[in-house]
Amino acid sequence: MLESLLALGGLVLLRDSVEWEGRSLLKALIKKSALCGEQVHILGCEVSEEEFREGFDSNINSRLVYHDLFRDPLNWSETGETLPGGPLEALRALCRRTDPGPVTIALDSLSWLLLHLPCTTLCQTLHTLSHQDSCHGDSSPGEQVHVLGLLHEELHGPGPLGVLSSLAQTEVTLSGAMGQASAHILYRRPQQRLTHQMDPTTHLTFNLRLSKKEREAKDSLTLPFQFSSEKQQALLCPGLGQATSHIFYEPDAYDDLDQEDPDDDLDV
Amino acid sequence: MAAAASCSTSTRSTGSVVVAASRNSVTSFQRRGPRASGTDSGCSRLVSIAGTRPSVRNGQLLVSTGLPALDQLLGGGLAVGTVLLIEEDKYNIYSPLLFKYFLAEGIVTGHTLLVASAKEDPADILQELPAPLLDDNCKKECDEDICNHKTESNIKMKIAWRYQLLPKMEARPVSSSRFGHYYDVSKRIPQELIEASKWHGFFLPEKISSTLNLEPCSLNHGYIKLLQFIQNIIYEEGFDGSNPQKKQKNILRIGIQNLGSPLWGDDICWTENCDSNHSLTKFLYMLRGLLRSSLSACIITVPTHLIQNKAIIARVTNLSDTVVGLESFIGSEKETNPLYKDYHGLIHIRQIPQLNNLIYDVSDVKDLAFKLKRKLFTIEHPPTPTVLLPSQTSTSRGHSPVW
């Protein structure tokens, strides 16, 4: 299931609620991306860094780049550790990131960002963030950007939820019944042509290639109707003696050829 | 009732074959354009623009929307100088298709395009347009142009040597004089057609630098930039008659995607009462003013299902001329309804404009459904509930009314 969530690039929206929390799913997706060798950036706003890193083993922890907005979001302590400009600047810095390779950006959480940033700015920044691969030209599917956003459904009205759903390529809604959690996944597949075509002639059980000897034998084969070049020229350019074909037709009583009303004006 | 309705639509279709716009017609029947819309000289000059024809009802100049079925429902086509508003379906699957049909029709008829979007780059949108289906008439016109070129075959063919001296078929830009074309959605438009066409793109993230601190004003900055862009194009290329030395008149087709979404910087999808409640309505009002004074037609898609304030939706509908709403069955309870099992959604013609006439135009087709087949987007009447007998569930659609 995790692979299918990460298959389409773009924004993956994880909607959770008080009863069915989504941070563990977010961490599972981060772990999967890190194991696949992608760079992972985390914008942590709701829980402290130690609490977030809990549960990851050390090799994964070393791959995570953590941007901490929890401890001192407004930069009151002025130690210079936090990012200047707050969350918006942090997001924009991620947009401007130029190192190549697939990357996963986890936003924990989108709800916090929604409450602290103007909504249209956030939408535009999210859109730029999730469509970064298009700026770098025609990229193969391995170079996708995944943006994972955790959204707490109960904090927002139908407006923000609807807008973020329409921006997301994949949407996972966590719910459950009787102690059993379930996830409802919605994919928006863009109807686009494949930029990455697999070569169909690999992994075949029969041989499609010709060896040099076979190629020579093929070329020297005389095909029927393959005349010598003189005969070809003679046939192609009819001389004066040859007559081109004509069709002589005389309409009889049953033919209706009315010159005044041909069928050209029928707009069928 | 159902039979009468279908009769009336068919008479409308035969009645609206206007031959005046087609250059190659050889027929003794010539329909005279009605004189309701102005002087004769004005009428005859406008009719010569490719891809347009005068309406049979009020003489208004019409362009095709790209879907002949939709043209028929709108009374022949979209009037030049008006706005076609498409209310997007919930998952935004079918409204981009109507948008692309409109733009593809512009390319095939040689109109100038202006594509504005905040989501996708206009160049990418143009790459995804459907390929036109050229029938024999258009191919004949193509061949006449091609036979004038003498081509030499520099490739010596081994097996097909008899075809060496035939002229090469090139996919040249087809300037078709027909009104309304069919498109194959499964194929992309050939690259040569896009390159031969004239288009202008407006991609919002490029035009607005996001780090600027802009003071709030009554109209959204994205909308202001877009209006200025459209106005510049109209003025520079003479669509409003400002360059009188231009002899060949042409139509400007404007397409604006996802207007009103937060990507344009508008708040109306977010909350019910926001500061910029009037941005979109002001934009539409100014846009319509620009369109009325120029030879252009515009298609706009708006995500009305996301707009929180119903009053804004009503205002937006009133400010547009033609309004078509799409409702897809995905995820709704109508998906399991046996009436709609062959269809993908409903299409609602919410408003048709009254232009230059006093007759109140009531659309007599209330329920229409669409389906997207692999190659074609079709609009049909679903079978009425009285027609389906309770015993016939899945196999046949009842052919005789119960009453």
Image (cartoon, helix red, strand yellow):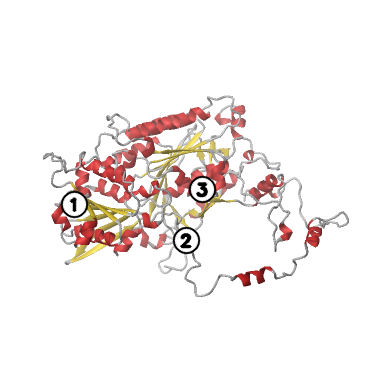
Give the CA separation, mark 2 to mark 3: 30 Å
Q: Which of the pair B269/B363 is nearer the observer? A: B269
Residue that sits furthest to the right in the current view? A241
Image quadrant where residue A175 sits: bottom left
The amino acid pointed to by label 2 is Pro
> Relative to residue A238, is residue B199 depicted above or below?
above
Q: How crowded is mark 2: few (under 14 residues within 10 Å), some or many (20 or more)?
A: few
- Separation of disc 3 and disc 1 at Cα? 43 Å
The number of discs equals 3
| Residue occupying the point 35% across, 51% down | A100
Residue bearing mark 1: A154
| Residue A120 in picture, x, y percent from top left | 28, 40
Which residue carries the number 2 mark? B401
Q: Do dots 2 and 3 share one subunit?
A: yes
Secondary structure found at label 1: helix
Judging depth in this view, the residue of A263 and A69 nearest the camera is A69
Residue B142 lies, with reference to residue B30, above or below; the image says: below
Q: Residue at x 60, y 31 (%)?
A: B248
The kind of residue tagged 3 is Leu
Q: How far from the left and from the top, in percent, is residue B293?
A: 48, 28
Q: What element carries label 2?
A: loop
Q: Kindly identify the residue that appears in the image at 77 percent across and 56 percent down.
A: A255
